[in-house]
Image (spheres, rainbow, N blue to C red):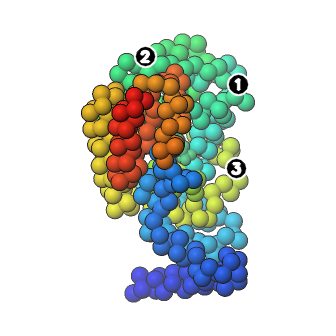
Amino acid sequence: MREGLQMRRRDFIRAGTLGGLAAGGGIGGLGDPLAAIVGGPGRGVAEGRVRLSSNENPLGISSAAKDALVEAIVLANRYPADQHRALVAKLAAAHEVGEDQVVLGTGSAEVLQMAVQAYAAPRAKLVMAEPTYEAVTNYQRTEAYELVRVPLTPGHEHDLDRMREAAESSGHPALVYLCNPNNPTATITSSAAIDAWIADAPDHVFFLSDEAYIEYVEDERMWSSLPWIAKKRNVLVVRTFSKIYGLAGLRIGYGIAHPDTAARLSDFASRNNINQLAIAAAGASFRDEGLMEKSRVVNRESRQMVEATLDELGLERMPTQANFLMHRINGDLATYRGRMAEAGFLVGRDFPPMLDWNRLSFGLPEDMGRFCDTLRDFRGKGWT
Ligand SMILES: Cc1ncc(COP(=O)(O)O)c(C=O)c1O
């Protein structure tokens, strides 16, 4: 009954809002183009090319998220405080934390930025792996940090011993960025080892635990740092709706921390930061088992196809626990990228010092099939 009412309301809104927009000539007499878009698949291409460069979800957004977006259009004239609170409550309940422990950001990138700003202090260090996700490096440029980059171990894990030495030796505050799985390598760092450090780290060491890709992880050596939140003020776990939930374009992510830490971070959030559409789509997608399972299945199929092709061609690859992997290209990266673009694929960017490796995001299996054929063709031409 309730569902029936909701459906009727949704149909009404869809007809009223979208039909009204079209009838008003706002979108040029194309009938009901927004409705057609909402009913269609996600876009996988940029400028006619398949985008395998940004670790996005190639499936597009779920139908529940599409419906939620349509419904939320009529809220566009309202500040989102009530909806923001409701999403925070939903996330808090799901993670079994208090509502004062969840901080939303315009993408998890904003949460990372908040942390870098909130924990900046004279003589503070920012300790991170190399290579790793660059955002925190960018945000620290205007802050007081001394940046310390610690190369990954030969096994592609964060070198926790050296990071610890860097973070704890001076006695000054340190922000430790742990990206697990790591971007760009898609490799994991043992959570047991991370836990051992967190357990007896001094309070002046703050852990920024970026779990953007955790939903893809199959290796049991990695788990979330979330349980620490109940015991420690110096841990922040960051999650995103951009990856498995497929909402990268809407910009929404969140952090979970001790209430004091969450309050400190919130001071650095821009006011009313999350928009109505992002809130609506995130609420509809969160822990949607159908969406998550389908994303994992498609990702696995694409991954296995790429791994088999790289092995067949003898191109070294890193083990992956995410929706992308790093592989050798046997040549110059810019040339490789240019040739791939001409063949219809946008791939990776530079991740120094790994300049003879490409970071490849997994697209739809049919696209990866064509990518693999292209790679074989490159081999035939002696390009890789
Ligand atoms: C490890 C990691 N953290 C954070 C982000 C930022 O994602 P977003 O701001 O879209 O949540 C990314 C994006 O690629 C990422 O790879």
In the picture, measured across the screen, residue 362 lies left or right of residue 130, that is left
Residue 144 image label:
1
At mark 1, the secondary structure is loop
Q: Which residue is mark 3?
A: 270
Alpha-carbon neighbours of circle 2 within 10 Å: few (<14), some, or many (≥20)?
few
Q: Earlier in the sequence, mark 1 or mark 3?
A: 1
User: Residue at (54%, 24%) from the top-left corner?
Assistant: 352
- Residue 179 can be seen, yes or no: no
Of pointers 3 and 2, the one earlier in the residue sequence:
2
Marks 3 and 2 sit apart, C-alpha to C-alpha, by 36 Å
Q: Is residue 384 above or below residue 243?
A: above
In the structure shown, which secondary structural element does the residue marked by tag 3 occupy? loop
Q: Is residue 35 left or right of residue 155?
A: right
Say which quarter of the image contains residue 109.
top right
Q: Which residue is mark 2?
A: 161
> Identity of the amino acid at label 3?
Ser
* Residue at 49% across, 47% down: 344
View extreme (front): residue: 381
Q: Is residue 238 above or below residue 156?
A: below
Q: Residue at x 41, y 82 (%)?
A: 3
